[in-house]
Image (cartoon, helix red, strand yellow):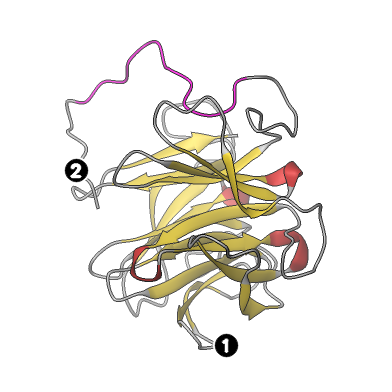
Amino acid sequence: MPILSVHARWLQNGTSVAGGHEYGGASNQLAYIGGFVVDDDGTVVIADICNNRIMQWKVGDMNGKVVAGGNGGGSRMDQLTHPGRVLIEQETNSLIICDYGNKRIVRWSLRNGITQGEVLLSNTCCSGLAMDDQRYLYVSNCAKHEVRRYQIGDKYGTRVAGGNDNGTGLNQLNIPLSVVVDRQQTVYVSDYGNYRVMKWNKNATEGIVVAGGQGNGTALTQLSGPTGLFVDTLGLSCNEME
C-alpha cells in the first residue's frame, strides 16, 4: 500500500493518460469508466463499462488495447457485460473482473493468445474488489449490502462487513461500492447510500465511520455519493465523488 504524504498537493492541471477523445468504442476512446488500476510500470487497466471491455493503456500510448471482453455484451466466456471493477493478480499475471451485468466475477489471463475468462464466483452483484497480501479476495455486494472475503476457489466466503440488510446502523451498509484492505485485513468501504466511508477491523461485528456520515451535502463533514476509495499506509483516505 503506497504512502501519501500529509503535505501532498495535487497538480492543478492534469494530463490525459487514456481516452480523452469523446465517448465511443474506438481504441482511443472510452464509454463510461468504472474502476481502474495502475501497474508498477505505470500501465493503466480500465473497466470500460459501456463498451463491455477491459482496456490497457501503457505509458505514452495514443491507443489502448483490449485485454478482456470487447466482443459485445453477453454471457459467453469471451464476453463481459458492464464490467465495473478490475484488479491485477500479479501471481498469475491475470485480471480479476467484476462482470456486473452477468452477476459474476471472472479471471482473465494477460498471457498472449488467451481469448476468454474463467468464472471464479457466480450469482454475485459485485460492486467492488480488493485483494490482500495473502491473496484473499474481498468483494462488495451492492444487492446484499455486504463485503465478503474469499480464498480463490471458495464459493461461499466469510462476511467481513455489513450483511444485516441495508440501513444506517454501524453493523449495516447501504450500497457498498469500493473496498480497500490493508495488511492487518482491516476493510474500508465506500458506503454509497449512507454518504460515508466505513472501517471494519478484522473480526469486527460493526464498523467505524471514518469519513462523512452526516448526510448528503457539500460541507467538510459530509460526502455526496462516495464511489472510489484510496487508503494509504498512514490510514488516510480520500473519496472520489460521483
Q: Quadrant for residue 149, please give it.
A: bottom left
**Which amino acid, mark 1?**
Lys
Determine the main secondary structure of the stretch shown in magenta: loop
Which mark, residue 155? 1
Left or right position of 22 against 3: right
Left or right position of 238 against 66: left
**Which amino acid, mark 2?**
Ile
Q: Which residue is situated farthest in the front direction here?
A: 113
Q: Mark 2 points at which residue?
A: 3
N-terminal label among 2 and 1:
2
Packing grade of label 2 (10 A; few <14, some 14-19, many >=20) is few
Can residue 139 be seen here? The reply is yes
Left or right position of 220 against 162: left
Residue at x 48% of width, y 63% of height: 111
Packing grade of label 1 (10 A; few <14, some 14-19, many >=20) is few
Residue at x 26% of width, y 21% of height: 9
Q: Tell me if residue 12 is in the magenta stretch.
A: yes
**Separation of residues labelled 2 and 1 (CA atoms):** 34 Å
**Residue 91 image offset from top left, x and y in percent:** 34, 70
**Residue 86 image offset from top left, x and y in percent:** 53, 55
SS at circle 2 = loop
Range drawn in magenta: 8-20
Can residue 167 be seen here? The reply is no
**Residue 97 image offset from top left, x and y in percent:** 57, 61
Q: Quadrant for residue 203, please give it.
A: bottom left
**Residue 25 image offset from top left, x and y in percent:** 74, 34
- Pick the residue in front: 211 or 227: 227
